[in-house]
Image (cartoon, rainbow, N blue to C red):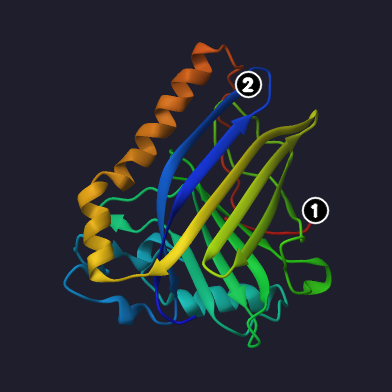
């Protein structure tokens, strides 16, 4: 798949303890080949410039505007992961100049099209980020049954400590994309998150239809984060202070 796609669907987030808390929201994402970003340029979609929809390379990778494809391939080479095919980014683009992505995913394939690595770029509302480079044992192809585990190392929510593990699963069947993230602390499963999306070719008509229906799509992400935090506080979920961030920004997917 070389043509960019627009994915729409829903995200579900469920906390199991000490108070149960669940919510769902509609979401939309861009899915694009990072080696073919120039093909996205149009009157309504910009690369490193102001457009109704835009992707700024400085928001990703080294965050200096450098080539994203080269940056990710260097990470894969350092980890000896044989992902020598297309690399696709799943992210919320800038909408009228603004975007906040709690997590963006890089899907790294081999030349045969098999998924060999998943890079989860996690960000918090303090402007910090952590990248988790995930692969299967012995860098085998990743399928819908593969569980990708890494240790949590970034303060994401004041209602969770910086302990425990994430377990990722990804699956794509035709136009349907599914991503799940289970977060476990020392007492077991604490939070379940699931993302279910349907992909369509990105066209001008589809982009304008999305913008007309959800002009505040990107801004709503940060508003909803704070609204759900208020609800957790009202339920008296314990509050955890923020720790100083670790120096490194990228962790491999191996369990320490």
| Residue 56 image point, x, y percent | 32, 65
Residue depth check, mark 1 versus mark 2: number of the one nearer the observer: 2
Note whether residue 97 is visible: no
244 vs 180, nearest the viewer: 180
Residue in view at x 36 percent, y 64 percent: 58
Picture residue at 44% right of the left edge, 20% below the top: 230
Secondary structure of the residue carrying numbered label 1: loop
Q: Please name the residue that numbered disc 1 is placed on.
A: 255
Pick the front one: 61 or 143: 143
Q: Is residue 114 above or below residue 120?
A: below
Numbered badge on residue 210: none
Q: Mark 2 points at which residue?
A: 20
Q: Position of residue 62 (x, y in %)?
A: 46, 66
- At 60% from the left edge and 73% from the top edge, which residue is drawn? 108
Q: How many labels does the image show?
A: 2
Residue density around tag 2, few if under 14, some if 14–19, many if 20 or more, within 10 Å: few
**Where on the picture, by quarter, is residue 191?**
top right
In x, y percent, where is residue 239? 58, 19
Confirm whether residue 188 shows in the render.
yes
Where residue 177 sits: x, y (%)?
56, 61
Alpha-carbon distance for marks 1 and 2? 28 Å
Viewer-nearest residue: 154 or 172: 172
Q: Assign a secondary structure to mark 2.
A: loop
Up-down relation of residue 253 to residue 77 (above or below): above
């Amino acid at each position: 798949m070389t043509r960019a796609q627009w994915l729409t669907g829903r995200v579900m987030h469920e906390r199991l303890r000490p108070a149960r808390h669940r919510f769902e929201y509609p979401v939309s994402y861009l899915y694009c080949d990072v080696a073919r970003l120039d093909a996205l340029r149009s009157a309504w979609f910009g690369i490193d410039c102001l457009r109704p929809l835009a992707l700024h390379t400085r928001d990703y990778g080294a965050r200096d505007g450098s080539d994203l494809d080269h940056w990710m391939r260097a990470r894969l080479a350092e980890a000896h992961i044989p992902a020598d095919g297309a690399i696709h980014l799943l992210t919320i683009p800038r909408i009228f100049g603004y975007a906040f992505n709690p997590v963006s995913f890089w899907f790294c394939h081999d030349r045969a099209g098999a998924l060999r690595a998943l890079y989860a770029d996690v960000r918090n509302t303090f402007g910090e980020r952590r990248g988790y480079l995930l692969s299967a044992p012995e860098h085998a192809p990743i399928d819908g049954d593969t569980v990708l585990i890494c240790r949590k190392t970034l303060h994401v929510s004041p209602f969770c400590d910086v302990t425990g593990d994430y377990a990722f699963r990804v699956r794509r069947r035709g136009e349907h994309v599914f991503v799940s993230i289970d977060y476990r602390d020392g007492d077991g499963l604490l939070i379940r998150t699931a993302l279910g999306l349907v992909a369509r070719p990105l066209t001008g008509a589809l982009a304008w239809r999305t913008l007309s229906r959800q002009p505040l799509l990107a801004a709503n992400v940060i508003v909803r984060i704070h609204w759900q935090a208020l609800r957790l506080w009202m339920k008296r979920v314990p509050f955890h202070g923020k720790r100083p961030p670790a120096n490194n920004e990228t962790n491999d997917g191996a369990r320490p």
